[in-house]
Amino acid sequence: MNLLPFGKLPAHRARTFVPSTADLGDWPQTAPLFDQLEARAARCQTAAELERWLFDWSELSAALDEEASRRYIAMTCHTDSAEAEKAYLHFVENIDPQLKPRQFALEKIYVAHPFREQLPPARFQVFDRDVKNHVELFRPENVALETEEAKLCQQYQKVTGSLTVNFRGEEKTLVQMGRYLEEPDRALRQETWELVTRRRLQEKDKLEDIFDQLIELRQRVARHAGFKNYRDYAFRRLGRFDYTPEDCTRFHDAVAREVMPAVREIQAARRHQLGLDKLHPGHLRPWDLAVDPQSRPPLKPFGAVDEMVSRTQKIFDRLDPGLAGGFRQMQDLRLLDLDNRKGKAPGGYQQTLSESRVPFIFMNAIGQQRDVETILHEAGHAFHALAANDEDLYAYRSAPIEFCEVASMSMELLGNEFLEEFYSAPQANRARRTHLEGIIGFFPWMATVDAFQHWIYTHPGHGRAERAAAWLELMDRFGGDVDWSGYETARGHLWHRQLHIFLHPFYYVEYGIAQLGALQVWANSKRDKAKALADYKQSLALGGSRPLPELFAAAGCPLRFDAATIKPLIQLAHDELKKL
Ligand SMILES: [Zn+2]
């Protein structure tokens, strides 16, 4: 049974090392390929031979990656299929754990190889730096600690994922409760917000316990690797060679100075539109932030998913013939599974099939504006994969996350120019307004989450009360004009909801950095659309072959996050909002 939405995909390159009949879901057939690579490395007599070896290793990595992706895609498209689940779990449980040490062994062989230094430096500089970094940070004594960390992370997910409340006689998940915060009835919003908040606070001590243990583990991991604190370790581990903790602090300062006035202005307008300024005291409350300020019904951009695809195609047709061709190719190859149906995993993602070198997009579209944002976003990632698919070094066919999100977030902004394909002019403007306000509002939350983690990991031995105080200080700085009186405990523990703080430490500022890049691409397109698009496409084609500042520069958006960079971008977003 074929559980994949797509059929046989054309090979981008014929295999030259991995046998075409090899079953890479079977470890006994896969292990000998690693044996061969290990043995061959020792026999490489020239830099050219080592280069050949790197490309064979690339071919194997891509083929294995695609094997894993296919099983993941089949599983998420058919969560009710026992066969799909078994195939996916087989890879996760039996192949992956064998694979990781074998890949790491090859990395070590590469780093120690006598001909490594003779490889063409411009070509291999980024690859070399990343592999060397990975090998250098490895400590055998950290393996057990990381397993323990993963278990604690899983506990966090278990505690937060299973929460329900009893709402008017019915048990509801917190996700289901979210939609009541969009209800025009203010008393209903307050009731549901309080219910959810109380439920979360019942888990407060459990989550603080988990987090204290996580901090302790992470500090030990960092010390083993020779770092004085976990922040500095995390920066290296995340491959942040091109910006520092001090740059991030400057970013937070710039958000406070340049973005907060715009946030307060948006909040004041919301307060006015909701009619709160006629009340006393008349402040915005935490339950007033998600509702449409004019109490309009939600936008309905399309009915059936086919309609979403054909209208999105029209947007790309108007934007750029090259990108439009890429999206059409994805339809022809059935690389889209977008409708919400029973037996599909939740959410949306873009996954590259690394050997076929084509992207696949998964979504659960139900006919709301969010779906239009998501398809444009994921299409941006897909264009990135297509643009870089002539690169033969597997590691270079994908870019660092900071730049991947420039590809996708730019596409939201560029695609939004043609939203009339989905809406009347006033409706299109409403969607644009929500999008731009969302972008502006994201920066302060990003700064809060990031600055909080900088504080946590540079204040070893801090207590829970100090931690809450540090968070509250950031909420004062970045929360704007929202009245939390009566809910001080909830405010001091709001960070419990941000899973990155628990699961993916320090991994959040990337979205802020990328959003600045995307705003610059958008600003460029307002000045010279053809050049902005040409630069965007050219930068995507670089994949991950160049360091981050070069990728950004190629896209026409210097990698800088100071006040001077942010100011004109927020001004532009602000001016656009005025026009809408
Ligand atoms: Zn993304």
Image: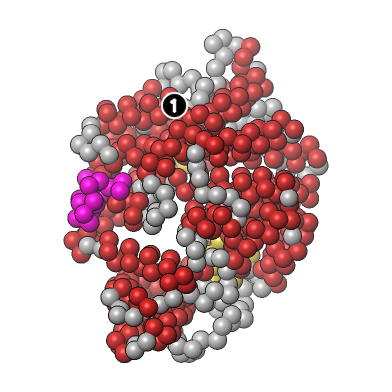
Q: Amino acid at mark 1?
A: Arg
- Quarter holding the N terminus? bottom right
Instruction: Give the dominant element type of the magenta stretch: helix, strand or loop.
Output: helix
Q: Against 561, is 88 above or below?
A: below
Q: Is residue 217 magenta?
A: yes
Instruction: Name the residue: 69% across, 27% down.
Output: 294
Depth check, front residue: 5 or 113: 113
Q: Position of residue 464 (x, y in %)?
A: 26, 31
Depth check, front residue: 569 or 221: 569
- Residue 527 is left or right of residue 464, and the answer is right
Q: Is residue 229 magenta?
A: yes
Res 541 → quadrant: bottom right
Q: Residue furthest top?
A: 280
Label 1 sits on a secondary structure element that is helix
Q: Residues within 10 Å of mark 1 (few under 14, many from 20)?
A: some
Q: Position of residue 495 (x, y in %)?
A: 39, 36
Instruction: Name the residue: 25% across, 49% down.
Output: 218
- Residue 408 is left or right of residue 471, and the answer is right
Depth check, front residue: 19 or 235: 235
- The answer to whether residue 371 is visible is no
Q: Residue furthest right?
A: 424
Residue on which the image places disc 1: 477
Is label 1's Cβ within 8 Å of ligand 1? no
Q: Against 135, is 428 above or below?
A: above
Instruction: Name the residue: 42% across, 68% down.
Output: 125
Q: Position of residue 268 (x, y in %)?
A: 61, 21
- The answer to whether residue 436 is visible is yes
Q: Position of residue 426 (x, y in %)?
A: 78, 37
**How many numbered marks does the figure carry?**
1
- Which range of residues does the magenta coloring cover? 216-232
Res 352 → quadrant: bottom right
- Residue 76 is left or right of residue 487, and the answer is right
